[in-house]
Image: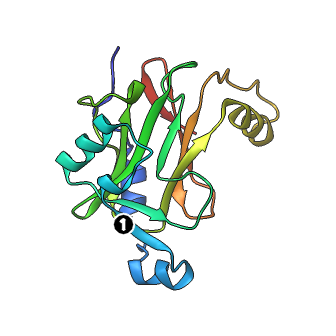
């Protein structure tokens, strides 16, 4: 299976670099429960994934009081029936998505590595929701056949970009 080492398009990178980044202080003013967690604090993760995050020096942005899963998510990101993990990881001045197919540490690259923005979150988007969005956004076109989850990546409480793995590569919707 072929995996793309670095995901992103030049226009997306240019837009991200040009956009004003939210500071930690601005995020904490609105959401006082915002924290960066060390991998050892993420008990829901498989031990192998936690160890890999520690080795990489990751810190994970989390909103402690939120019930909804975000930034450390489990879903069927590569194929239907396979449980995978995705983690929004901050290292230095960059933040991106690390993927763990079947909960195993691999040499997969960080997806959508961008300048750190503490207001950035990721969450699971089910195949059902992807299908509904495709119908809503493009009513005159037949929707793609989604059979597993995608990952929505964007600013807190705002629509983001959805990335979806199909045909052995990642696409953005």
80 versus 153 height, above or below: above
Q: Is residue 117 visible?
A: no
18 versus 100 height, above or below: below
The answer to which of 169 and 33 lies nearer the viewer is 33
- Point 55% across, 48% down: residue: 123
The answer to which of 9 and 146 lies nearer the viewer is 146
Task: Name the quadrant of the C terminus.
Answer: top right
The answer to which of 135 and 29 lies nearer the viewer is 29
- Point 51% across, 66% down: residue: 63
Residue occupied by mark 1: 36
In the visual, does 100 lie left or right of 52? right
Q: Is residue 3 visible?
A: yes
Task: Name the quadrant of the N terminus.
Answer: top left
What percent of the width, then of the height, locates residue 18?
39, 67
Dot 1 lies on which element? strand
What percent of the width, then of the height, locates residue 87?
40, 46
| Displayed quadrant of residue 59 | bottom left
- Point 46% across, 62% down: residue: 62
36 versus 135 height, above or below: below
| Displayed quadrant of residue 67 | bottom right
């Amino acid at each position: 299976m072929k995996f793309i080492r670095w995901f992103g398009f030049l226009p997306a990178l240019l837009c991200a670099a040009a956009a004003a980044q939210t500071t930690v202080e601005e995020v904490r003013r609105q959401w006082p429960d915002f924290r960066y967690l060390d991998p050892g604090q993420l008990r829901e993760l498989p031990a192998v994934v936690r160890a890999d995050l520690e080795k990489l020096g990751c810190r994970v942005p989390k909103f402690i009081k939120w019930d909804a899963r975000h930034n450390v998510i489990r879903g069927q990101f590569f194929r239907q029936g396979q449980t995978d993990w995705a983690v929004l990881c901050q290292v230095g001045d960059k933040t991106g998505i690390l993927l763990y197919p079947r909960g195993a540490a691999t040499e997969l690259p960080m997806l959508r590595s961008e300048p750190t923005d503490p207001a950035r979150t990721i969450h699971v988007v089910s195949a059902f929701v992807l299908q509904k969005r495709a119908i809503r956004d493009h009513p005159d076109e037949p929707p793609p056949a989604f059979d597993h989850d995608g990952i929505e990546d964007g600013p807190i409480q705002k629509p983001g970009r959805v990335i979806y793995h199909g045909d052995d590569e990642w696409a953005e919707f």
